[in-house]
Amino acid sequence: MNLPSEAASSVTEWLGPDWTARSLAGDASVRAYYRVTTAGGETFIVTYYPEDVRRELRHFLDAYESVASCCAAPEVLRHSESAVLQRDVGERTLFDALHQNREEGLRLYRAAIDLLAAFQKAPDRGLNPPFSAAFFMNELEMARELYVEKLMGFDGEPLRPVMKMICENVAQHPYALCHRDFHGQNIHILNDALFLIDYQDLRQGPDTYDMASLLRDRGVARLLGDAAEMDLLAHYAARTGAAGDVRRRYFETLLQRSIKILGTFSKMPIVRGLFHYLDFIPPTLESVRRCIDELPEYGALRDIFPFDFDLEGARARARSLHGST
């Protein structure tokens, strides 16, 4: 696949005229990713920023400057006004490793916690505002609208008081630097070394926020198991010096994050037609249930939150909703 012309011009300037590019699967943004191979067989990753998100490129470079000073991130080699050239750290992710071999995955998940501890030492340059109760509530409002009301057809109004309580409580946790999307698909493995990507949303937030993402995002808890999940949480506390009731904070943060992610996993098919995100909803609902079991003060959610999710029915509703947008 050919690069957009302005990105192609930059790549030719950086690498010479003899190269080919292959499109890579992207994330939830509109950025485009390519693996570029030179005539000599060397590979690089190029990220292209379309015109409407070009301001994000400078933001990414500022975040890279912070993160790269403390932990392993793919090296930025060159950049233009529309594209960034980085070292290629391969396609294998931590998520892949756990699915391929659980024992190796557990070892690498412990290493990922060491990576997180290093990341938390990065200088906070104030690139993004810290998490707040209002910010958390806005995220849950999106989940209420898109998952509860649109996708599931429930009345979301009774959820507002308990959602507000969750957000206010989580905002009172001790804060640390958060990646915001610290999960296994954003950690690549090359020669047994871990590299962190997609860190441009870093900000101050609850100290267990990234652990909730790492251990529960996209169903990895099914492979980890409860005992390994708690062992890894204990490793995090020991590695970072997190004090107090870390377990409680972890599940409370996980509750907020899981409900929020239901909104994201509903938005992608309804708004952008990316229907595979619906596959991530059942394990996310499992996380919500697990949090309620751990935190009985949120037990009211058992009766007012829509847990009875049918994938095929949701896919049909999402297609109908997407067609009407």
Image (spheres, rainbow, N blue to C red):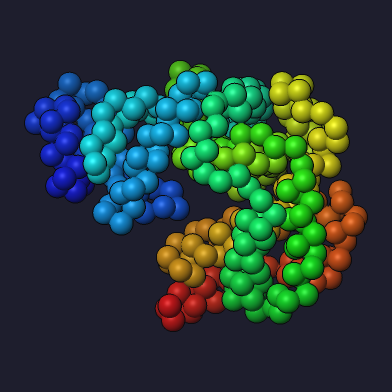
Depth order, front residue of 133/14: 133
Farthest residue, direction left? 17
Residue visible at 66% across and 34% down? 176
Where residue 233 sits in the image (x, y, percent)? Answer: 75, 31
Residue at coordinates 49% horizontally, 28% vertically from top-left?
67
From this view, report whether residue 103 is shown above or below residue 266. Answer: above
Outermost front residue: 126
Instruction: Inspect this view and state whether residue 263 appears.
Output: yes
In which quadrant of the rendered view does residue 281 lie?
bottom right
Residue 226, by quadrant, is top right
Q: How many labels does the image show?
A: 0
Decide if residue 190 is on the left or right side of residue 175: left
Name the residue: 72% across, 27% down. 236
Tell me the quarter of the image containing the C terminus.
bottom left
The answer to whether residue 223 is seen in the rendering is no
Between residues 252 and 284, which one lies in front from this camera angle? 252
Q: Residue at x 85, y 32 (%)?
A: 244
In depth, the one of 260 and 171 nearer the eye is: 171
Q: Nearer the viewer, residue 91 or 267?
A: 267
Compared with 86, 57 (above or below) is: below
Q: Would you identify the image quadrant in which residue 42 lies? A: top left
Image spot of residue 308 (x, y percent): 73, 69
Picture coordinates of residue 12, whole percent (x, y): 13, 33
Q: Is residue 33 above or below residue 275?
A: above
